[in-house]
Image (cartoon, coloured by chain):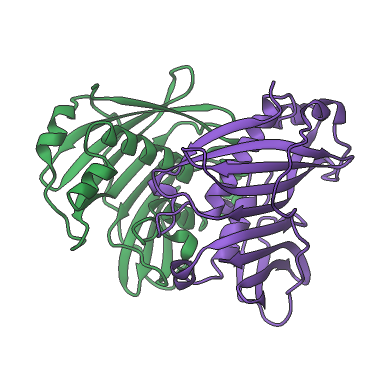
Chain colours: A purple, B green
Amino acid sequence: MEKEGIYPFTVEAYLTDFRGKATLAMIGNCLIHAASQHASSRGFGFGDMAGRHTAWVLSRLAIELQVYPRAGERLVVRTWISEVGRLATHRCFELSDGEGRIFGYARSTWAAIDLESRRPTLLDAPALNPYLSDRLCPIEPPMKIQPVEQGSPEETFRVRYSDLDINGHLNSMKYIEHFLDLFGREEFEAHDITRLDIAYQAEGRYGMELRLFRRETAEGHFALAACCGEKSICRAAVRWG
Amino acid sequence: MEKEGIYPFTVEAYLTDFRGKATLAMIGNCLIHAASQHASSRGFGFGDMAGRHTAWVLSRLAIELQVYPRAGERLVVRTWISEVGRLATHRCFELSDGEGRIFGYARSTWAAIDLESRRPTLLDAPALNPYLSDRLCPIEPPMKIQPVEQGSPEETFRVRYSDLDINGHLNSMKYIEHFLDLFGREEFEAHDITRLDIAYQAEGRYGMELRLFRRETAEGHFALAACCGEKSICRAAVRWG
């Protein structure tokens, strides 16, 4: 089995944004799909983890895109494991079009949690190590994001049925949708987000009232936070091109 | 080219609800995917329509399910055209699992609109007629839904970036998510929605404040409405099993 996996997708017209471009949440779902297929065909997927009473949890993600694929276009994801630690594994992604032109990269950090205690658990390094690749990823790793939860939130929302994932927590791509909805349509008309960083810090639960904060930290750079009470459960940063 | 098309899907774990079951919005996206592939491989898809300055618009949809497919399971959609009118075409769907066991059906009505005027336009009957099938669909057609927009709304929300589709309108599956979010998690824990009807009446636009109404019309039967001001732009009905 190859260290690297290749997963082709088509950007379906009914899944794009109003510009006919793939959304970051849709691209994120493609990355998760690729990660999940890559892991399960190598013996450390969702099912294998569940057999050990553990589950993968995405803890950090960074996506950098020079262009966004459009409706009808191909999106080819290559993924490989770049680091295996005691408690976390690092996975990289290359994004290219149907002609092999690379238009983006992504990097991610995954932890294994115990399904009962919901606490981090040791990784199964012997299962993972044979697939550790020395390929480098040319973008910065997921960055530290500065706290912006001060003053009054831009928005609040309550976690509902459609926000939940199979673990009963706020779906990781739904956070991205809620954060991007803090920006107006006119911003997406004028330019693209060229980099997104997101750090999942605690689990968003059903019924939680989340307060969303946004602050411009440099021209075109925004830090974002989703807080339950005073506590931030997710932070993100976006950079507009 | 066969009249009927067959489109297999897998219910991905990262797309299910908290119960590990496919969501109605995800199933709806599979139906739209099947419809779109079926049409484009027969000469009347998105691209063909755009060449005539027209687009397909989903106007009504009804889905009936005996069981919901779960994470990791197959969902096989068969679709065929059951009626071609002057202004609307009717398309049916059969849903089965990986072993050919049928667990649901859906029926839909599609209109063609002129891309400039946004008004209904005559269908290209000569392109469609060769694919008209006489296969019957055993569920009731999309039903008339009674108005429930009275008193104070259950919820209001403003249409934002992540709600928009490629035409710049509220995505048809996002309406379903917003409507289902009027029900609590405990209702989904206790039972399933066995039938959903939805009627798209007018286009939801960016920035619109939509008021969502819900009323129980018989035991386990709910009518829903999304209104802009006094005007309903979408109605739905759900039946809990």
Above or below residue A38? Residue B120 is below
- Rendered residue at 54%/42% (across/down): A96
Which quarter of the picture shows residue B45?
top left
Front residue of this view, candidates B10 and A85: A85
Above or below residue B115? Residue A114 is above
Indicate left or right for B156 with B60 as reference. right
User: Is residue A111 at least partly visible in the picture?
Assistant: yes
Which quarter of the picture shows residue A34?
top right
Above or below residue B121? Residue A6 is above
- Residue A1 x %, y %: 69, 20
Which quarter of the picture shows residue A80?
top right
- Residue B196 x %, y %: 39, 45
- Residue B20 x %, y %: 61, 37
Question: So how many labels did they put on this image?
Answer: 0
- Rendered residue at 42%/60% (across/down): B164
Above or below residue A154? Residue B118 is above
User: Is residue B159 at least partly visible in the picture?
Assistant: no
In the displayed orientation, state which residue is furthest to the top: B99
Front residue of this view, candidates A70 and A56: A70
